[in-house]
Image (spheres, rainbow, N blue to C red):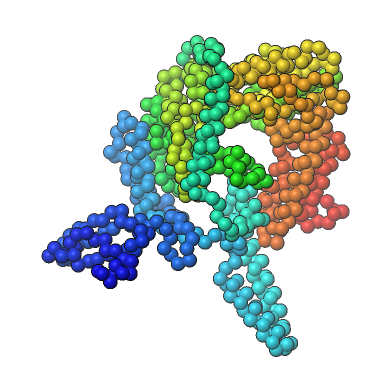
Amino acid sequence: MAAMTTMGLSQIISGPTHQAGHTLDLVFVAGDGLVGVEEQIILPLSWSDHYLISLRLTVSSNLRRGGGPIKMVRPRRLMDPERFLRSLGDLSTMEADDPVDALVTRYNGELSRAIDTIAPERPLLLRGVAPAPWFTGELAEMKRARRRLECRWQTTRDVSDRARSRAAIRAYSAALRAARKVFSTARIASATNRSSELFRVVGELLHPPQVGGAPDISSTRCSEFAHHFADKVAQIRSDLDAGLDALPGEVTEASVCSILWDSFRLVQPDDVDKILGAVRATTCALDPCPSWLLKQASGGLVDWFVRIINASLEQGIFPSGLKQAVVRPVLKKASLDPANLSNYRPISNLPFLGKVLERVVASQLQGFLEDTDFLDQSQSGFRPGYSTETALVALVDDLRRELDRGSVTLLVLLDISAAFDTIDHGILLGRLSGMGLGGTVLQWLQSFLEGRSQLMKLGDTCSDPWPLTCGVPQGSILSPMLFNIYMKPLGEVIRSFGVRCHLYVDDTQLYYSFPPNSKEAPRILDQCLAAVLAWMRANKLKLNPDKTEVLQVSRTSDRGIGWQPVLDGVALPLKAQVRSLGVLLDSALTLEAQVSAVAGRAFAQLKLVRQLRPYLEKSDLTMVVHALVTSRLDYCNALYVGLPLKTAQKLQLVQRSAARFLTGADYAAV
């Protein structure tokens, strides 16, 4: 023992390991604290005089040669849906009236046990991303053989050696192109019918990740992000509370309405099959197993989902185990300073089961909104038949009509700070009650809103969770619908001044038309903006005058109107062009700036895609062109109807260039 101690080793067995009471079996670990004993169990065996020793060890750092961080992963090849279903338990011990929280706890526990059975976690040494993942061992051997032949020819200068060297170079180049083509085709095929994934895959093919220093994912950095996002919302709420003595009666008192909907319709197995097919397989760090595995094994899990969903709907409770969100910071623009926390936006990820439950409620809530025609006529977004294109077509049509009449129109694009994060739960529940919700429906929605928390995650490092006392969860299916209900009264406030508006979720646009020599226009528009500001403050929403934009639409926009609208004491400057829902609008509504920007970005994407041409099949290349180029031309293309040929020709040039690129035709043919 003394000799082992001199080598820095410590013996950790603390009891007898033999029937005679002796400690004959020893286990040594490094004595520098790298390895710790979390659990030690010594059990007698019927078939041996030695005892069974079971240890659970913790490793504080990577002990493998070469260093580098270790990540625990589950081999995907082991995650077979049929084996997964066989490893699951049944629901025989669950009663119909069990609390939904108990059902969810059992669901998470059984799924965790099943996935640990078929695909236990294994340590994976992270060596960085390979700059050329298509470079295989066979290619490496061909490269070495090519190099040997080159060296031989340089030594002998023999004609036959030169011929063999050139043949090896050609063979290696052809094999390298073929390997990259196979790799690229497989990556494109993995993203079929998933546009966001296709964008990511093409980006990685064009710009492979570089092996470099790891980003700062320390616990300190993680806590800094958590405090930054939490403090931002707290500061907004504090500023709003300080500037408001008391809430107006129309905000605190819900309108009297008879209860029109007090209970949910329970789901059937067929309903669950459709819902699981519609929900995206995005996995949260809090999920017990990958979501894609649940979707593939959905046939054997339908009874689980039906039992949990119906228990939640009947009891009017959203399970507390599904109320936590995992937040990741994402840089708003690649050109921004990554050291500045203000340049990041929080992206939330929610448990898969919670999103399935939300989709059930969202479908029934959407049906109620349509049956009662509750939402304002000016509201778009997350409504069937409404989109950014329909909102922009209606807006531009109104602006052009006023332009034809010779009127001046001021388009004001309001900016709301952290709109989803600052919604007041009491006000929202009052609106829900006022629209006729009651019983377990209102109780469920209240449970959905309250008691939530979220934590920040950077790499494998997580912050402590912090509670959310306001707002609707980002990334939720229900949140945009609840936000629309929350914002519904704003349209009435704006129209009471004779000002028109369009609301696309948190993008609020109001516009006021008047004769060029109107004396009343400044007073009316300023009063309207003051009323909007007061409504926002009363409803715990913060307008940002510095980011609010104003566009003057008129025949003589270059001469101006001699005044500027005022919001919260800030004069709003008139701009030559603004971006509304992703479309550039100019003062004369020519859309020349929009068409030029679209054509420029489309040509830039086409130029990048040309780099992939040698490595993709024609069908895959066509799919990439449609995703990266044609999609840009299609966005809100109804606005381009009636444009002058000179303007529309820029888009036609993009189409022709894409057609020549795919077909290989010469310039004169297309």
Above or below — where is 658 with respect to 353?
A: below
The picture quadrant where one finds residue 61 is: bottom left
Percent across and percent down for residue 572 are 74, 24
Above or below — where is 163 with respect to 255?
A: below
Screen quadrant of the N terminus: bottom left
Percent across and percent down for residue 476 are 52, 34
- Residue 355 relative to residue 582: left or right: left
- Foreground residue among 439 and 247: 247
- Foreground residue among 538 and 120: 538
The residue positioned 37% from the left and 52% from the top of the image is: 116
- Residue 91 relative to residue 200: left or right: left
Percent across and percent down for residue 86 are 35, 50
Percent across and percent down for residue 114 are 36, 49
The residue positioned 54% from the left and 50% from the top of the image is: 216
Residue 35 visible to an observer of this rendering: yes
The residue positioned 52% from the left and 41% from the top of the image is: 224
Residue 303 visible to an observer of this rendering: no
- Residue 95 relative to residue 207: left or right: left
- Foreground residue among 398 and 237: 237
The picture quadrant where one finds residue 229 is: top right
Q: How many marks?
A: 0
- Residue 233 relative to residue 108: left or right: right
